[in-house]
Amino acid sequence: QVQLVQSGAEVKKPGASLKVSCKASGYTFTSYGISWVRQAPGQGLEWMGWISVYNDNTNYAQNLQGRVTMTTDTSTSTAYMELRSLRSDDTAVYYCARDRGGNYGMDVWGQGTTVTVSS
Amino acid sequence: SYVPTQPPSVSVAPGKTARITCGGNNIGSKNVHWYQQKPGLAPVLVIYYDSDRPSGIPERFSGSNSGNTATLTISRVEAGDEADYYCQVWDSSSDRVFGGGTKLTVL
């Protein structure tokens, strides 16, 4: 079946970097993009950015430009999201989601990765 | 930046119809998707492209989008529909953005 499986929970110190992985299975990885979405405790969903697996084009949310990088490895059908210079307000659950493009929504989601940033 | 607005909460009795709105300037010209999220779980896409339903989503869920308001309608509401619902807008200038979410309470 189609699924996205994310890496495990992380605890980071302020100023550190984070890299979350998202392994896809059950579909042709290069036919879809991947969006990353985060959710701070008790808060709503925040779109972080999107990467085309086909050509590695990226669109990042303005408030994360310069701190976030999204990449893919087609040999392992895995997407990655790296966030640098972590702050306490980066504490959140991070999700990857299959995203073909603006007309189709995010139709398959990973289980989420809990990230805690604390000194 | 474009930020769609949702009511924080909506309450409905079982068997009735729930309507959750997503407002924004000329939102009718943009693509709107809707997600259901239950506590501790990842979101689930329930409506895409304003009014299309992914496979496996009950026909009780429907969507519309016109003017300055998009609406998610849930007919014959069941206890299991209690969740947070988020609209997500896409357009070429703002890319992807979520509304603030609406908590649906089934009385």
Image (cartoon, rainbow, N blue to C red):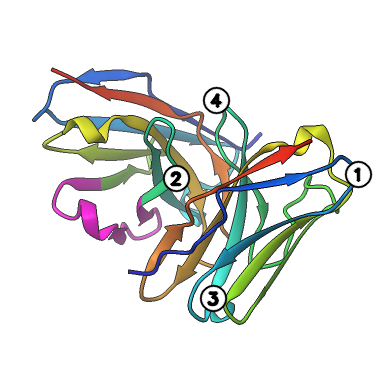
Q: Chain of mark 1?
A: B
Q: Name the disc covering residue B15, or none.
A: 1
Q: Position of residue B1 (x, y in %)?
A: 32, 69
Q: Secondary structure at mark 3?
A: helix
Asked whether residue A53 is drawn in magenta, I would say yes
A74 or A3: which is nearer to us?
A: A3
Q: CA distance from mark 1 to mark 2?
A: 29 Å
Q: Amino acid at mark 4?
A: Gly
Q: Name the disc covering residue B71, or none.
A: none
Q: Which residue is mark 3?
A: B27
Q: CA distance from mark 4 to mark 1?
A: 26 Å
The answer to whether residue A10 is visible is yes
Q: Amino acid at mark 2?
A: Leu
A8 or B66: which is nearer to us?
A: B66
**Magenta stretch bounds:** A48-69
Q: Position of residue A78 (x, y in %)?
A: 39, 37
Residue beneath the point at 41% across and 64% down: B3
Snapshot quadrant of residue A119: top left
Q: Chain of mark 4?
A: B
Residue beneath the point at 61% across and 82% down: B67
Q: Position of residue A65 (x, y in %)?
A: 18, 55
Label 4: how many Cα within 10 Å (few below 14, some 14–19, many 20+) = few
Q: Secondary structure at mark 1?
A: loop
Q: Position of residue A115 (x, y in %)?
A: 31, 25
Q: Earlier in the sequence, mark 3 or mark 4?
A: 3
Q: CA distance from mark 4 to mark 2?
A: 13 Å
Q: Which residue is mark 2?
A: A45
Q: Amino acid at mark 3?
A: Ile
Label 1: how many Cα within 10 Å (few below 14, some 14–19, many 20+) = few
Label 3: how many Cα within 10 Å (few below 14, some 14–19, many 20+) = many
